Amino acid sequence: MTSRSLRWTSAPALAGALVLLTVLAAGPLRSLDAALQGYWAKRYTPNWFGFLDSVPNAVAGQAVCLPVLLVIAVVLARKYRTWHPLAIVVAAEVAFYVGVGGMKILLQRTSPAAGAGHFWEGGVFAHGWYGIAYPSGHAAEAILFYGAAAYLLRTYANPDMRLRKPLAFLVGLITAQSIVVAFYLGFHWPTDLLAGMLAGALMLRIIVDVDRRIAAGTPVLGWQPPAVRTAVPALPALAPAPSRTSGAAVPSAASTASPPAQPSPVPALATLPTVSQSANDLPPLRPVAVRTMSARPGPVSPWPGRRATPFALREHVRHARVRELQTTGKG
């Protein structure tokens, strides 16, 4: 993933896009939502409405995506003997109900089946689950839970680039099909689906960033992750001190200590005779002729893979001359 894509998928960028979309959905985009929303499945393919609702639309629901994430986490936890994958599952559930569910309860936008799509006019007690449609839960679950499963596979299975791209493509495909199916069924306003995708991506980004900070030992909101504890080997037990008996004198350390060793004498170095000779007493240097060899190409061997020798070249020339005489008849 490049640095530009990381900037676009960072938590501040996703949060800013979600806030901007919410402001537009509350005002300028309301007419566009009303124009694009419709129960298209009942109008064009009424016989397929039940199938689309129970199969493709259910892929992004808790009944499917949560067991998939849980199975992957359990397999990785048993294989690597760690609770970390299960902690990611718990974090995804908490992020969905607290983050996405909290936005639903806070904004209280009615769905197409319960109202005109105004904010703060719905509610769980007034309209049930149809009174809290923004952001879309299915779109958020698709990218949050399947993205968490892909993150676990990339973290523990350590796949190469040939597997990383299909994982990202699969998560994007599931998210796209959940948005298209929900729009075709008419359960949400179009901006609900886009907001659900952004909200799920934001929750996933927060989980990944916090998990990587904890793994690196970086403080998270002022909390310092605990250091990894290693087993310290126990020190060997000391021997008990000898007990003092009455009438017996305990020798002191000074009396039992051996006398310090005397340093051995260093033999004197023999004095070397000094040679004093001036530069005039040295014999003159004679010029030496240096022969330079020109970079001529070496002989080409008639046998491939072997270097030609003078004898081989003479034999080759002699045989060529014999063949020439036999061909022309000149002697």
Image (tube, grey):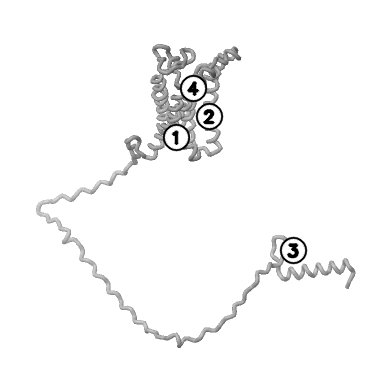
Q: Amino acid at mark 1?
A: Ser
CA distance for labels 3 and 2: 64 Å
CA distance for labels 3 and 1: 68 Å
Residue labelled with disc 1: 10
Do the numbered discs 4 and 2 sit on residues whose CB atoms are within 8 Å?
no
Residue labelled with disc 4: 29
Residue labelled with disc 3: 302
Q: Which mark is residue 172?
A: 2
Do the numbered discs 3 and 2 sit on residues whose CB atoms are within 8 Å?
no
Q: Amino acid at mark 4?
A: Leu
In this picture, residue 262 sits left or right of residue 31: left
Badge 2 marks a residue whose secondary structure is: helix
Name which residue lies at 46% across and 37% down.
Answer: 7
Q: Residue furthest front?
A: 28
Badge 1 marks a residue whose secondary structure is: loop
Q: Nearer the viewer, mark 4 or mark 1?
A: 4
Between 254 and 88, the residue placed more toward the observer is: 88
Q: Nearer the viewer, mark 4 or mark 3?
A: 4
Between 317 and 104, the residue placed more toward the observer is: 104
Q: Nearer the viewer, mark 3 or mark 1?
A: 1
Query: Residue 319 location in percent, x, y?
Result: 80, 68
Say whether disc 3 or disc 1 marks the residue closer to the N-terminus. Answer: 1
Query: Residue 309 location in percent, x, y?
Result: 70, 69
Q: Amino acid at mark 3?
A: Pro
Say whether disc 1 or disc 2 marks the residue closer to the N-terminus. Answer: 1
Say whether disc 4 or disc 2 marks the residue closer to the N-terminus. Answer: 4
Between 194 and 278, the residue placed more toward the observer is: 194
Q: Which mark is residue 57?
A: none
